[in-house]
Structures are given as structure tokens and as C-alpha cells.
């Protein structure tokens, strides 16, 4: 529940990958550098910054393969050191086909230039739906983020987030979908504190107010990390989310996730792994979960061409469904 954008959705992989909804693009989540500052051992003996609440489970989630179905082609183009664009065409027999145009304008300030942090991100598809992000480093410690999303001609999400990063803690406040006429608003507060060099504790408070309802959900979080593994737990009234990430060696990474939702009364356990073959320019990601879903993605770098071939398949044995995808990423 780290992002208000996901408040209406179930836990992680609950309806994935056999959902009729269009899978979100990667940029819908926070950029990796935005969420995950380095968890280094400080030479001065002080505790490190714990990073963002959104990044607690990122190490484990990055091991799992992302859904691919149908035929997809992405063309990326860097126009300058501060301006990037991409075109995506997706043809599918399961979900509506679409064309998507993506543009990024990168920040030029001293705090983000080295990290290549996007300042403005825009994306529009062939149905007229628009997504827009503004990511700003106001100071070295204060970051601001604004999100607007439309579904064709209707506004779906508008949210504003401010994050402060101290030496050993992170605090953030998000205001989502404020509506004065309907007297509704969603407020989210995050706080993380480094207790030791490897232990992080914190929580999330979500408050929702509307004409017909009002309530809040408190979620407590903890993470313990060592050089080769990370264990994370979120637990609250809405459910629980536990993950374990382990790097076996330079080529193999594994992750295990457990998710339980009190709203849907469902639990899911997932196992994922990633295998890198540098000599063959290939990366393979696979997964299996308790809902009898097995899937895998193979990425092959087509050197010397600036392109990556992506092939994937997901099988739902319980639902007797199969999804196969082929994609190519140029640039």
C-alpha cells in the first residue's frame, strides 16, 4: 500500500498475470533511484537513511517476471542529455491493443543530474488516457512528486507527495484525490527509521474521508537486511505482506512473497528467481505461486544491435489458461 495509486487494488500478484485489465507501465511506479537510496555502511559510524516506504519490497519484486502477452514493440530514443521519448505498440487478443507515447524531461540540478532523475514524465495512449508525473528535488533532503491520471476524458487520480530524508529516517505525506465538493480526500503518511545498520522499522497510516464513510488503516513495517539477503514484513488491518530476497551469487537471485488480504479473504505465496548469463547476453526470470500459476520471461540482448528480444509464457493450471508473448525493445 505504499502508493495511493494502488489503494484500490489487491495485494501484489493477486489478479496477475491473468487479469483482463491492461498491465501498468513500468513508470507508473516510482523510479528505482527515487525509492531506493544506497543502503551503505557509513564510514563515520552513523546509521544510513532507510530509503522510501515504497521500496521496502522492491528487491524481491524485481526478481519476478513481468507479464507479457501478445506482441509488443518499444522504441526508445534519447534526443538530448535531458530529453527522452519512446513509442510502444501492443497487439493483443486478450486485452485491447494500443499505442503509447512516452516522454521524459530530465532534471538538470546538482542533486539529480548524476542520478538521471526525471523531472517531468508524460504518457498518452491511443484511447486518450493520460498519465503525468512531476518529480522534483526541492533541496538535498526534500523531494516533491505530483501525479495526474485520466481515463479517456475523466480524471482518475491526482495526488501530491512530499518526502523528507534525514540522516537515519524518512518521512513522507501524500494527499490524493482531494475533492471539496464531495468532501472526500485520501491522506497517507509514511515513516521509516534505521534502528541499526541492518534493521529498519516504520509504518504507514492511510486515512480516507468521504460523504458516506470515513476510516483509517495503520500498517506496521520492518526490514532486516544483510549483504546477500533482505527480509521484509508489512502487517496491519488490511492484511500482511512478507518477502524474502536472497542473492545466491552474481548470476542467481531468488525471492519469496507471502500476501494476505482481509478484504478479499485470500492468501498467495509466490516464488521467483532470476538467472543471468552474461556470456550469452541473456536474463531469465521465472515464477510459481500457490494459485497454480507458472511463468517465465527470457530477455536476449541482440548484440551488436541496440535491441533486446523478450519472450514469455504464463500458464494458469487451475484456470486452464495460457498466455504467450513476444516483444522487442529497441534503444
Image (cartoon, rainbow, N blue to C red):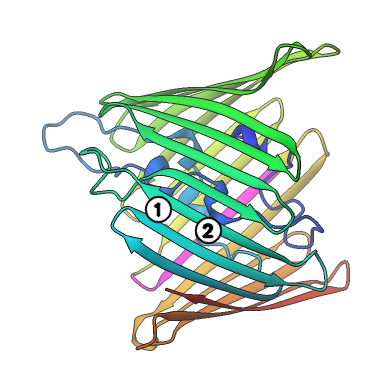
For the magenta stretch, what is the residue range?
Answer: 250-259
Secondary structure beneath disc 1? strand
Q: Which residue is label 2 attached to?
A: 255
Q: Position of residue 16 (x, y in %)?
A: 73, 57
Q: Position of residue 323 (x, y in %)?
A: 76, 74
Q: Residues within 10 Å of mark 2 (few under 14, many from 20)?
A: many
Q: Is residue 190 above or below residue 123?
A: above
Q: Which residue is label 1 attached to?
A: 229
Given residues 178 and 3, the one toward you in this image is: 178
Horizontally, residue 57 falls left or right of residue 117, namely right
In the rendered image, which quarter contains the C terminus? bottom left
**Magenta region includes residue 149:** no
Could you tell me which residue is drawn at 53 percent across and 67 percent down? 273
First in sequence, mark 1 or 2: give its number: 1
Q: Residues within 10 Å of mark 1 (few under 14, many from 20)?
A: some
Secondary structure beneath disc 2? strand
In the rendered image, which quarter contains the N terminus? top right
Horizontally, residue 212 falls left or right of residue 325, namely right
Q: Position of residue 113 (x, y in %)?
A: 25, 46
Could you tell me which residue is drawn at 77 percent across and 53 percent down? 15
Horizontally, residue 152 falls left or right of residue 302, namely right
Amino acid at each position: 500500500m505504499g502508493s495511493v495509486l494502488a489503494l484500490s487494488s489487491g495485494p501484489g500478484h493477486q489478479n496477475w498475470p491473468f487479469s483482463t485489465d491492461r498491465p501498468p507501465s513500468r513508470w507508473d511506479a516510482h523510479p528505482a533511484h527515487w525509492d531506493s537510496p544506497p543502503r551503505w555502511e557509513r564510514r563515520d559510524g552513523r546509521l544510513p537513511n532507510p530509503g522510501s516506504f515504497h521500496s521496502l519490497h522492491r528487491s524481491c519484486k524485481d526478481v519476478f517476471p513481468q507479464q507479457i502477452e501478445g506482441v509488443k514493440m518499444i522504441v526508445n530514443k534519447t534526443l538530448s542529455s535531458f530529453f527522452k521519448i519512446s513509442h510502444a505498440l501492443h497487439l493483443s487478443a486478450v486485452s485491447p491493443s494500443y499505442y503509447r507515447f512516452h516522454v521524459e524531461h530530465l532534471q538538470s540540478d546538482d542533486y539529480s543530474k548524476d542520478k538521471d532523475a526525471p523531472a517531468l514524465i508524460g504518457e498518452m495512449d491511443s484511447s486518450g488516457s493520460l498519465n503525468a508525473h512531476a518529480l522534483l528535488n526541492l533541496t538535498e533532503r526534500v523531494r516533491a512528486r505530483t501525479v495526474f491520471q485520466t481515463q479517456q476524458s475523466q480524471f482518475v487520480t491526482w495526488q501530491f507527495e512530499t518526502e523528507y530524508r534525514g540522516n537515519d529516517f524518512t518521512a513522507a505525506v501524500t494527499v490524493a484525490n482531494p475533492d471539496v465538493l464531495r468532501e472526500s480526500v485520501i491522506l497517507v503518511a509514511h515513516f521509516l527509521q534505521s534502528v541499526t545498520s541492518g534493521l529498519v522499522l516504520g509504518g504507514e497510516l492511510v486515512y480516507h474521508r468521504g460523504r458516506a464513510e470515513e476510516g483509517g488503516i495503520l500498517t506496521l513495517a520492518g526490514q532486516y537486511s544483510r549483504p546477500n539477503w533482505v527480509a521484509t514484513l508489512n502487517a496491519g488491518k488490511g492484511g500482511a505482506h512478507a518477502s524474502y530476497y536472497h542473492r545466491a551469487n552474481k548470476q542467481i537471485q531468488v525471492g519469496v512473497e507471502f500476501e494476505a488480504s482481509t478484504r478479499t479473504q485470500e492468501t498467495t505465496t509466490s516464488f521467483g528467481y532470476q538467472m543471468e548469463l552474461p556470456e550469452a547476453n541473456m536474463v531469465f526470470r521465472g515464477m510459481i505461486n500457490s494459485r497454480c500459476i507458472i511463468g517465465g520471461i527470457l530477455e536476449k540482448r541482440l548484440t551488436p544491435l541496440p535491441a533486446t528480444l523478450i519472450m514469455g509464457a504464463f500458464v494458469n493450471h487451475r484456470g486452464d489458461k495460457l498466455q504467450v508473448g513476444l516483444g522487442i525493445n529497441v534503444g
